[in-house]
Image (cartoon, rainbow, N blue to C red):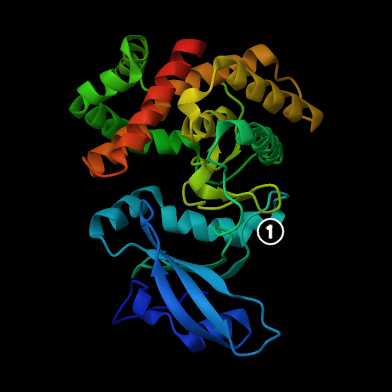
Amino acid sequence: MCMTRKKNPIFTKGQISHAWLSNILSESVTIRQIQPLAAGYVSDVYRIHLQATDLANKTTSVIVKTASLEPAKRMIASQFKSYQREYQFYRDIAPELDLSTPECYYKHFHEQPLSFCLVLEDVSSADRYPDTRASAQTIDETIVKQMAGLHQSHWNLPSGLPTFIDNLDQIGASYRAVFDRHKSIAHGCLGDFAWEVVRDYIHHGFKVQQPYPSTLIHVDIKPDNFSLKNDLTLFDWGDYCFGPPTFDLANFMINTPNSHQACQRHDLHLMAIYHKTLLELGVLNYSLREFHQDFQDILPLLAFTPLALINAAPGTSKTDKLRRILQQLGQMIEWHC
């Protein structure tokens, strides 16, 4: 559904009403609280706490996601078509996936004038990733198996969707700029060897080795973007594209809480489970050697997001976490490159 709002084209918190949500949910509800959540990279996100007017109604909260009110974030979203991608994901792709995603009660996107809104099942309050490495190991295995299932479902299929190469073309100049601006942070976190690997990668071609398997990838698989409901419920699909599956796997591994405590043996264990699951699900002609090479080739690219976020908000409370991610990436590059 596409609607044009001439007076207020950007859907805002003020447009969330009892009647609007009752109509979407097909049940009579009263809004108890509109709770802003930590803002997404390009979106504003709210948890809407509801009071049902009928005891038979079960919906107690929903997530509403809208275009950011900050012009800079909307510009980034426009550059990567993030709002359009997520709208199209829930319209076209989610219904066909075996992987659990939040139920989408309402989806809306209009490019000119800009208007974007999703009303989603609130799964973020379900079981989250555990805080300790000991209790997380089994969950890690479950997650990489589910990830393999996602990737196998579109393995090397033709697609008219955005590609990983499209993303690289968009971020190439930005990666070089933020890397050069934050050389001391990158060097200090990555370590000498990994810093040289990343530096050479972004200043000498900025290419992913071809050919690589291409499939549907989430691009931002990390604990903040999944709950453990139904084994794994994955959300925040604004960056999905068709690209190398090892990007999702490596990104998850460097973003895992306490990942700085993880050892090479655990990494290799998860990689072996992922590859074995792919083969069991029917992926052909993808040897363990090819998989390890693809994993190695993708690692230098993973420094971009933490460096870009440090650049966007230096000195914030998130900086320490982003530095830890870079430290884990540096360790992983030393192990695998």
Q: Residues within 10 Å of mark 1 (few under 14, many from 20)?
A: some
Q: Is residue 137 above or below residue 208?
A: below
Disc count in the image? 1
Instruction: Inspect this view and state whether residue 250 appears.
Output: yes
**Image quadrant in which you'd find residue 121:** bottom right
**Nearer to us in this view, 200 or 39:** 39
Give x and y (percent) for residue 327. 38, 23
Point 61% across, 15% down: residue: 265
**Nearer to us in this view, 75 or 247:** 247
Judged left or right of residue 279, residue 290 is: left
Q: Is residue 64 above or below residue 208?
A: below
Point 63% across, 15% down: residue: 290
Dot 1 falls on a residue whose secondary structure is: helix
Point 53% across, 23% down: residue: 262
Give the amino acid type for the residue marked by disc 1 in the picture.
Answer: Pro
**Image quadrant in which you'd find residue 292:** top right
Instruction: Inspect this view and state whether residue 207 appears.
Output: no
Give x and y (percent) for residue 59. 62, 75
Give x and y (percent) for residue 216. 60, 41
**Nearer to us in this view, 335 or 175:** 335
Q: Which residue is mark 1?
A: 95
Which residue is farthest left?
181
